[in-house]
Amino acid sequence: MAKILVTYFSASGVTAKVAEKLAKAAKADLFEIKPEVPYSSADLDWTNKKSRSSVEMADKTSRVAMSGKVENMAQYDTVFVGFPIWWGVAPHIVNSFLEAYDFSGKAIHLFATSGGSGMGRSMEELKASAHGAVWGAEKKLSAGISQADADAWVKEILK
């Protein structure tokens, strides 16, 4: 039987709640991608061009140091990767996560939360960070997704 991991970055807790429902639906392990230095409210102020998140996102090559590692990533065949949409793409800490492991032959499915925008260029911009991965589904999910809807999406992907 395939081993599944649901991993996510969540700046405000919204993506975390969605990830928990997906992990339950997939009977998967759960891992939070955490920055080594947590984001403060000021860091996340997208209206301030000098805020930490604005500076990071303005530079496509920026990477964010992470705290913690997935133990034995080799055991997973399928990895769901979740994040909030920042500036139309995944936050660069997601690139940091993908670049930290060998995803050769592993299926990667993306999910995101957003107050208004869609997935944007997230998959396109993340592909270079996980060479050899088999890219699958990508979907923006509602912050208030029901367990039944999470179950249905996971079932559709894993069939």
Image (tube, helix red, strand yellow):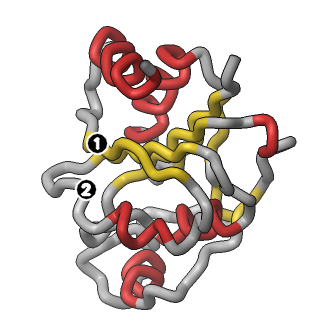
Q: Which mark is residue 119?
A: 2
Q: Residue at x 44, y 66 (%)?
A: 91
Left/right placement of residue 103 relative to residue 156 reads right
Q: Earlier in the sequence, mark 1 or mark 2?
A: 2
Q: Position of residue 8 (x, y in %)?
A: 53, 45
What's the amino acid at mark 1? Answer: Lys
The vertical placement of 122 against 125, above or below, is above
Coordinates of residue 158 in the picture (x, y in percent): 46, 23
Instruction: Tell whether 78 sits left or right of 1.
Output: left
Quadrant including the N terminus: top right
Residue at image location 85% in from the left, 42% down from the top: 72
Q: Are marks 1 and 2 in contact (CB under 8 Å)?
A: yes
Q: Nearer the viewer, residue 8 or 79?
A: 79
Residue 4: numbered disc: none
- Please tell me how crowded label 1 is: few (under 14), some (14-19), or many (20+) other residues with Cα within 10 Å: some
Q: Residue at x 48, y 36 (%)?
A: 16
- Give the answer, above or below, for where 77 lies relative to 103: above
- Location of residue 53 (image quadrant): bottom left
Q: Quadrant of the C terminus?
A: top left
| 10 Å crowding of disc 2: few (<14), some (14-19), many (20+) | many
Res. 139 mark:
1
Q: Is residue 125 left or right of residue 46?
A: right
Q: Quadrant of residue 87?
A: bottom left
Q: Is residue 41 depicted above or below 113 in this figure?
A: below
Q: Nearer the viewer, residue 35 or 48?
A: 35
Q: Amino acid at mark 2?
A: Met
**Disc 1/disc 2 C-alpha distance (Å):** 7 Å
Q: Position of residue 26 (x, y in %)?
A: 53, 19
Number of residue marks: 2
